[in-house]
């Protein structure tokens, strides 16, 4: 699946139909692929927003192997996002960017069910001005972290900075490193996971590894500490797919401690969400050209888990 952002009008998604999905109705197939409800997908089809080449498709169209479908998703309706006086852990800030340490449990931008208390609400209060490329709902947001993933994020204060940072992430010249606590004892000290990732057909809120029809996803990993039943791992992203590290570690057989979606088993530790922290970020400053590197300290819950593991208390 290819994702393209049109700054002025709409978002475009392109989906290539895998052989295993051939014969499905377009509304059912695309609802799963895009992670939306079937009724919402039917609305997009009725509005003529789904096509194959120059042919506009209907909801009952049966998709075929190898064909590329294009979905034009309209900009979200304007939503007045209110600035909120929420404390921010700011690591660095100038007139172009702000680097923050997002706490676990904070949603990045407003969405159904979370219109307040988000990082965007806090940023609007603190910064006043943010880039407008990602609409009023996601101002300044260049990349995201899951609600229950803590750590470092970079935010753009103007469009020029946003474009530069997005291009760096796309070209992989911006580097992101995560620390994870996983179940099990990995067989190798380091390695690379290279797969395709797509939405899970049985649960559209989850992602999964697929043989075809997904998006390329590559994660490098290195074991930092071993404790038998648990390991501390550093993960380096080469791509930035939804839930990528969580999916890849589960795929290897070493799911993240506390992950409610991919490892919903009880653990002998106090943590609300997956033990995953965005620890390091390196990028080129969009205005000065200076290479910058920042690090966010581990949150208290993960630090306590590692201390217990080192003391054999599990």
Image: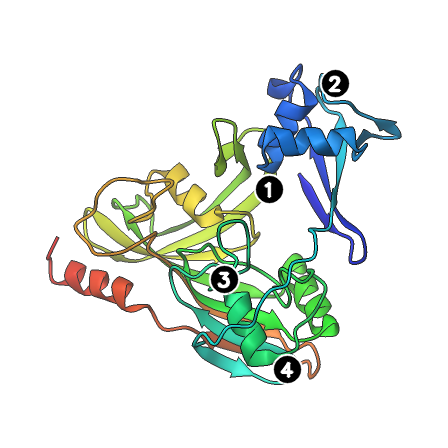
Task: Name which residue lies at 34% across and 52% down.
Answer: 274
Task: Name which residue lies at 59% across and 36% down.
Answer: 36
Position in image of residue 139 (x %, y %): 64, 66
Mark toward the start of the polypeptide (4 vs 1): 1
As helix, strand or loop, the secondary structure at mark 3 comes to loop
Task: Name which residue lies at 81% across and 57% down.
Answer: 8
- What residue is disc 4 on? 290
Q: How is the image coloured?
A: rainbow
Q: Distance between the Cα atoms at labels 4 and 2?
A: 52 Å
Choose between 181 and 275: the one closer to the eye. Answer: 275
Badge 1: few (under 14), some or many (20 or more) residues near its Cα, within 10 Å? some
Mark toward the start of the polypeptide (3 vs 4): 3
Mark toward the start of the polypeptide (1 vs 2): 2
Position in image of residue 244 (x %, y %): 49, 47
Examine the rendering and report whether any part of residue 117 can be seen: yes
As helix, strand or loop, the secondary structure at mark 2 comes to loop
Give yes or no for contact between labels 3 and 1 (Cβ–Cβ under 8 Å).
no
Quadrant, the N terminus: top right
Badge 3: few (under 14), some or many (20 or more) residues near its Cα, within 10 Å? some
Badge 4: few (under 14), some or many (20 or more) residues near its Cα, within 10 Å? few
Mark 1 vs mark 2: give the one in front: 2
Task: Name which residue lies at 68% across and 60% down.
Answer: 134
The disc label shown at residue 116, or none: 3
- Name the image quarter holding residue 249: top left
Above or below, 113 relative to 202: below
Mark toward the start of the polypeptide (3 vs 2): 2
The disc label shown at residue 61, or none: 2
The disc label shown at residue 216, or none: 1
Mark 3 vs mark 2: give the one in front: 3
Position in image of residue 202 (x %, y %): 47, 26
Position in image of residue 50 (x %, y %): 77, 32
């Amino acid at each position: 699946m290819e994702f393209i952002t049109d700054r002025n009008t709409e978002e475009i998604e392109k989906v290539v139909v895998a052989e295993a999905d051939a014969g499905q109705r377009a509304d059912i197939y695309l609802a799963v692929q895009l992670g939306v409800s079937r009724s919402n997908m039917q609305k997009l089809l009725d509005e003529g927003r789904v096509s194959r080449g120059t042919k506009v498709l209907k909801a009952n169209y049966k998709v075929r192997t190898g064909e590329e479908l294009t979905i034009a998703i309209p900009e979200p309706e304007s939503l007045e996002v209110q600035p909120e006086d929420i404390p921010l852990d700011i690591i660095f800030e100038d007139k172009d960017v702000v680097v923050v340490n997002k706490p676990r449990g904070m949603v990045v931008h407003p969405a159904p069910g979370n219109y307040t208390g988000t990082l965007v609400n806090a940023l609007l209060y603190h910064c006043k001005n943010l880039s407008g490329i990602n609409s009023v709902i996601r101002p300044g947001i260049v990349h995201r972290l899951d609600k229950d993933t803590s750590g470092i994020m970079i935010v753009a204060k103007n469009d020029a900075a946003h474009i530069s940072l997005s291009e760096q992430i796309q070209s992989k010249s911006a580097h992101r490193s995560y620390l994870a606590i996983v179940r099990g004892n990995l067989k190798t000290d380091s390695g690379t996971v290279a797969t395709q990732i797509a939405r899970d057909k049985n649960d559209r809120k989850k992602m999964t590894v697929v043989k075809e029809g997904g998006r390329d996803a590559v994660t490098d990993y290195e074991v930092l500490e071993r404790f038998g039943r648990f390991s501390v791992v550093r993960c380096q992203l080469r791509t930035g797919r939804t839930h990528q590290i969580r999916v890849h570690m589960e795929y290897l057989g070493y799911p993240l401690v506390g992950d409610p979606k991919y490892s919903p088993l009880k653990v002998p530790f106090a943590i609300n969400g997956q033990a995953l922290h965005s620890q390091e970020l390196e990028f080129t400053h969009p205005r000065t050209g200076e290479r910058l590197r920042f690090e966010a300290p581990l949150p208290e819950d993960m630090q306590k888990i590692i201390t217990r593991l080192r003391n054999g208390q599990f």
